[in-house]
Image (cartoon, grey):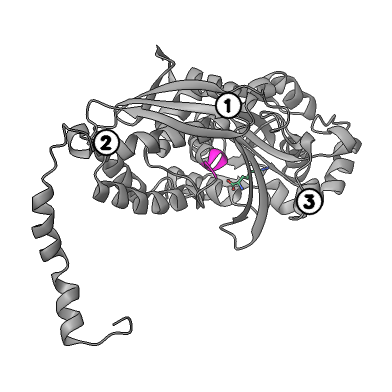
């Protein structure tokens, strides 16, 4: 009788490589690894070899970079999704897309089991499980195995298990540090080792995309980003597709030391964790789109958008991508960004990105209304009447009721 099959989400990292061995041993299943290329760069190289060496019977690699950018990253950018105001959700956005590919691959191979390398303490297990269960639907029998949640090994025990199984670990960095890193085009999340002490400054070897402020160039660089309906379309007046644009911004901004985030984060599972991120392109693009919106959105649109952004980013963080509410909010975001087309000029220097210009043919900034020069067309006289009526409620209240300040 042929063995059952398991599709394992495979990054090539330590946890997922150990998982191949562990699933075979514990569940007696054939393991087919699925590596979803989300633009992590060299990561993909040699991944098939690593999977087979660990004992996988097949290895599937899917390039989903364009889908990731157009259907996950850009909608989130349009929605202003920054978890707790600092985290661009690079990992969180990837999980629903990966879940979709896991379910599709399981269907293709007739696999009854799917697996991911998440632990029992993190957000990612929730995102994967919730997404897979939602996508697979009620009638379908897809069972989830989460080895790292089940085996209960510490990091050191994992290293030992890997050694015993003859697996080579490539994460070992300087000083034998093994960070837990999740990486894709939109950013990398770095956890573990010395970072677990919230007082310790992140060691320089934790970073690989950004230079330190000290090592960043001594001269600034000015860039121009073009947007159409809230989507970035050009860099320095050169039209670019999303993947290339993000790649190129990661390099340029990273060189200037932009995109390092050190955050003590509220996890969905109730604990706080110290997370270090490198998201250079994301920081630049969020800064730019926000600057453009200051010109193209009314005050009320800005306020409502910002309220919904918070809800949206929590939804993404909390593994609720596949919900109607997320789609509802996106409809609003698409509508609110209808006129967010134009250019933003930014200066990159020593870890900082500064907006130095913005323009749009739909800009609500009206020079003649705003200027203090002779072309001023603002009606100063009508201000008096406006203030008279505007202050009416507080004046009436002050007369009829005594409150503290009076
Ligand atoms: N805290 C982030 C999140 O939940 C990133 C987790 C990524 N994992 C890692 N191994 N660093 O989205």
Name the residue tied to disc 3: 200
Say whether marks 3 and 1 touch (CB < 8 Å): no
Q: Quadrant of residue 352?
A: top right
Where is residue 298? Give x, y as percent.
24, 44
Mark 3: give few (<14), some (14-19) or many (20+) Cα within 10 Å: few
- At horizontal 20% and vertical 34% (from top left) the residue drawn is 366
Q: Is residue 384 above or below residue 19?
A: below
Where is residue 168? Give x, y as percent.
85, 29
Name the residue tied to disc 2: 296
Cα separation between marks 3 and 1: 25 Å
Circle nearer the N terminus (2, 1): 1
Under 8 Å from ligand 1: the CB of mark 2?
Answer: no
Q: Is residue 315 above or below residue 88?
A: below
Where is residue 240? Give x, y as percent.
43, 15
| Viewer-side residue, 129 vs 251 | 251
Circle nearer the N terminus (3, 2): 3
Mark 2: give few (<14), some (14-19) or many (20+) Cα within 10 Å: many
In the rendering, which numbered label is found on residue 253? 1
Residue stretch rendered in magenta on the structure: 87-92
Q: Quadrant of residue 46?
A: top right
Horizontal side of residue 52 vs 105, given as left or right: right
Q: In the rendered structure, does residue 90 fall within the stretch colored magenta?
A: yes
Looking at this view, name the residue that lies furthest to the front. 374
Q: Is residue 2 visible?
A: no
In the rendering, which numbered label is found on residue 313? none
- At horizontal 89% and vertical 37% (from top left) the residue drawn is 175
Q: Quadrant of residue 23?
A: top right
């Amino acid at each position: 009788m042929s063995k059952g099959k398991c599709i394992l989400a495979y990054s090539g990292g330590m946890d997922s490589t150990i998982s191949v061995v562990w699933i075979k041993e514990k569940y007696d299943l054939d393991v087919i690894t699925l590596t979803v290329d989300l633009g992590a760069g060299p990561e993909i190289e040699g991944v098939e070899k690593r999977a087979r060496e660990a004992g996988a019977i097949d290895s599937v690699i899917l390039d989903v970079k364009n889908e990731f950018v157009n259907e996950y990253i850009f909608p989130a950018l349009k929605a202003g999704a920054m978890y707790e105001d600092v985290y661009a959700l690079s990992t969180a956005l990837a999980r629903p897309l990966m879940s979709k590919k896991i379910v599709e691959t399981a269907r293709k191979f007739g696999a009854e089991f799917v697996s991911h390398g998440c632990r029992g303490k993190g957000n990612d297990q929730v995102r994967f499980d919730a997404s897979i269960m939602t996508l697979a639907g009620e009638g379908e029998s897809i069972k989830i195995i989460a080895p790292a949640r089940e085996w209960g090994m510490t990091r050191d025990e994992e290293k030992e298990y890997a050694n015993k199984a003859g697996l080579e670990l490539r994460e070992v960095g300087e000083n034998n540090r093994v960070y837990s890193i999740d990486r894709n085009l939109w950013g990398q999340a770095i956890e573990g080792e010395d970072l677990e002490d919230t007082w310790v400054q992140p060691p320089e070897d934790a970073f690989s995309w950004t230079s330190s402020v000290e090592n960043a160039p001594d001269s600034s660089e000015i860039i121009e980003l073009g947007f159409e309906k809230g989507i970035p379309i050009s860099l320095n007046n050169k039209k670019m597709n999303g993947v290339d644009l993000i790649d190129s911004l990661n390099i340029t901004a990273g060189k200037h030391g932009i995109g390092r985030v050190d955050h003590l984060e509220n996890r969905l599972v109730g604990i706080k964790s110290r997370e270090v991120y490198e998201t250079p392109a994301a920081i630049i693009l969020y800064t730019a789109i926000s600057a453009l919106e200051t010109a193209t959105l009314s005050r009320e649109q800005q306020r409502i958008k910002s309220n919904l952004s918070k809800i949206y980013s929590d939804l993404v963080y909390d593994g609720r991508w596949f919900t109607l509410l997320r789609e509802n909010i996106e409809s609003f975001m698409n509508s609110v960004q209808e006129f967010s087309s134009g250019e933003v000029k930014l200066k990159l220097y020593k870890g900082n990105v500064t907006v130095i210009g913005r323009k749009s043919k739909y800009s609500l900034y009206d020079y003649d209304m705003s200027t203090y020069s002779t072309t001023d067309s603002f009606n100063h006289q009508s201000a008096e009447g406006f203030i008279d009526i505007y202050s009416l409620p507080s004046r009436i209240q002050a007369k009829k009721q005594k409150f503290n300040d009076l």
